[in-house]
Image: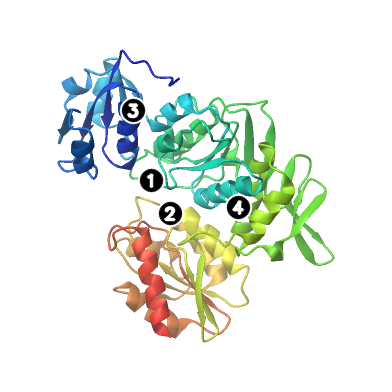
């Protein structure tokens, strides 16, 4: 039976992907609801009017009086809770919630909950593949792929959920079997007042959790609540009790748990120290929900990585080209620069720039100086990156992605790698990060 009262009126605020999943869920349960969206023509409006013509929908500026007709507002993650109309409704006693809260109330199987500024899609996918290799009926989604409410099924044995800070803002009690914040670095500073507010939003994932997984190398990943819960850790150092890490013996590096070597690092298809950390995080999460090591290691050996995430494109004239277009913040770019930079014989030629979302780029300077031969800058906030890097390495400006790749080809030497890891969102020049990555790969292929 669905855990949702049928005698209350609700409004879905936001008619994108998650908003439409809320519409389907509420309609299937006979719940009384309406829809509102700040946009005049939201993405799913045609679908709503075709499939649910009886549902009232208001488009344009949010009407506080209309919102206050509801007992509860299900707010889509793309809309900030600081929106004045939402704040006014909340002040008058209307509850603000979201699709993840509703999912958690109705999920009958354990939840593995994963957040973090970076790597959450890779780790979420890995845990899902580990569970499938172990023979579990697993559902993977949330911020990645399928909306959470569309995953609900009595047949599922395990949910593996990627959750963003935006989704967690409206999540009051997730109740995950195991939860983690993989890492925290500045992101979405155009939405949050600062890093502390973003950090607090991320840590809502631990509410009601039964176990936690912590990154030993990032103090901000340690839960702000839930002291005394069973805790597993991961990190690139040597592991101790209840810990996953890297152990070196006779010149060979191993993924390890406590005092047991699990598999040689060289057997991973995904490259770089950051991906070793991702593998360890996935092992810790899988172990917490009882997945056997043989199945998890089999999944790790076959995992080739996700598109646009430090993805190898091709080798040309002794130079490797990598598409890390998903690096839309400084932390993600740092992980790729340090991880890949330590893994190649030569230097990196980095392509960076785009919409910085209010980020501070100063942390790029040291790793860029250590691992990069040059940086090719493009996009709206390229001047901010240039100022932050100073004279760390030579800088070159490009007017387009094709221009950037041509300049990289001229700069790179045999043994080097060209890395698209922008540290910025793509919206100033591209439809999304996927388009940016696809155009990069296409342009690299054209070099041949």
Answer few, some or many: residues within 10 Å of disc 1's Cα (few below 14, many 20 plus, some between 14 and 19).
Answer: many
Q: Residues within 10 Å of mark 3 (few under 14, many from 20)?
A: few
CA distance separating discs 1 and 2: 8 Å
User: Mark 1 or mark 4, which has the lower sequence index?
Assistant: 1
Between marks 3 and 4 in the image, the one whose residue lies nearer the viewer = 3
The reply to whether callout 1 and callout 2 are in contact (CB within 8 Å) is yes
**Disc 1 versus disc 4: nearer the observer:** 4
Q: Secondary structure at mark 4?
A: helix
Q: Which residue is mark 2?
A: 329
Closest to the camera, between mark 1 and mark 3, is: 3
Question: Residue tagged by mark 1?
Answer: 188
Label whose residue precedes the other's in the sequence (4 or 2): 4
Name the residue beneath numbered marker 4: 278
Q: Quadrant of residue 304?
A: bottom right
Tell which of 116 and 125 is nearer to you: 125
Mark 3 = which residue? 28
- Residue in view at x 30 percent, y 15 percent: 8
Q: Position of residue 66 (x, y in %)?
A: 17, 22
Determine whether, in the image, residue 195 is placed left or right of residue 378: right
Q: Position of residue 268 (x, y in %)?
A: 66, 62
Q: Position of residue 428 (x, y in %)?
A: 27, 60
Query: x%, y% of residue 374?
Result: 47, 75
Q: Earlier in the sequence, mark 3 or mark 4?
A: 3
Q: Secondary structure at mark 2?
A: loop
**Dot 1 and dot 3 residues touching (CB under 8 Å):** no
Whichever of callouts 1 and 2 sits on the residue coming sooner in the sequence is 1
């Amino acid at each position: 039976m669905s855990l949702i009262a049928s005698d209350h009126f609700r409004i879905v605020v936001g008619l994108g992907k998650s908003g439409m999943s809320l519409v389907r869920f509420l309609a299937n349960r006979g719940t009384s609801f309406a829809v509102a969206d700040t946009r005049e023509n939201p993405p799913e409006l045609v679908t709503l009017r075709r499939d649910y013509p009886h549902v009232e929908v208001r488009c344009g500026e949010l009407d506080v009086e209309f919102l206050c007709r509801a007992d509860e507002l299900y707010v889509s993650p793309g809309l900030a809770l600081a929106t004045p109309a939402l704040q006014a409704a909340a002040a008058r006693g209307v509850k603000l919630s979201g699709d993840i809260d509703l999912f958690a109330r109705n999920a009958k199987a354990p939840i593995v909950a994963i957040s973090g500024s970076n790597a959450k899609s890779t780790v979420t996918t890995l845990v899902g593949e580990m569970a499938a290799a172990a023979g579990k009926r697993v559902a993977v989604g949330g911020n990645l792929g399928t909306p959470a409410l569309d995953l609900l099924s009595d047949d599922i044995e395990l949910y593996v959920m990627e959750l963003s800070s935006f989704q967690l803002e409206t999540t009051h009690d997730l109740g995950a079997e195991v939860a983690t914040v993989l890492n925290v670095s500045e992101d979405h500073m155009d939405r949050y007042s600062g890093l502390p507010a973003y950090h607090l939003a991320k840590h809502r994932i631990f509410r009601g959790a039964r176990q936690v997984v912590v990154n030993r190398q990032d103090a901000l990943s340690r839960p702000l609540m839930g002291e005394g819960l069973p805790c597993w850790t991961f990190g690139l150092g040597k592991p101790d009790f209840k810990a996953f890490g890297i152990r070196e013996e006779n010149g060979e590096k191993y993924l390890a748990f406590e005092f047991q070597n699990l598999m040689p690092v060289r057997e991973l298809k995904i490259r770089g120290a950051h991906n070793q950390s991702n593998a360890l995080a996935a092992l810790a999460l899988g172990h917490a929900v009882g997945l056997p090591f043989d199945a998890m290691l089999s999944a790790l050996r076959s995992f080739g990585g996700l598109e646009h995430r430090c993805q190898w494109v091709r080798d040309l004239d002794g130079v490797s080209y990598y598409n890390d277009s998903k690096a839309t913040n400084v932390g993600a770019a740092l992980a790729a620069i340090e991880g890949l930079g330590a893994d190649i014989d030569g230097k990196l030629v980095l392509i960076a720039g785009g919409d910085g979302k209010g980020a501070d780029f100063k942390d790029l300077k040291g790793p860029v100086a250590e691992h990069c031969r040059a940086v090719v800058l493009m996009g709206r906030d390229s001047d901010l990156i240039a100022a932050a890097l100073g004279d760390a390495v030579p800088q070159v400006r490009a007017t387009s992605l094709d221009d950037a790749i041509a300049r990289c080809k001229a700069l790179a030497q045999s043994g080097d790698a060209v890395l698209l890891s922008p540290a910025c969102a793509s919206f100033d020049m591209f439809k999304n990060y996927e388009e940016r990555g696809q155009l990069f790969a296409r342009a690299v292929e054209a070099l041949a």
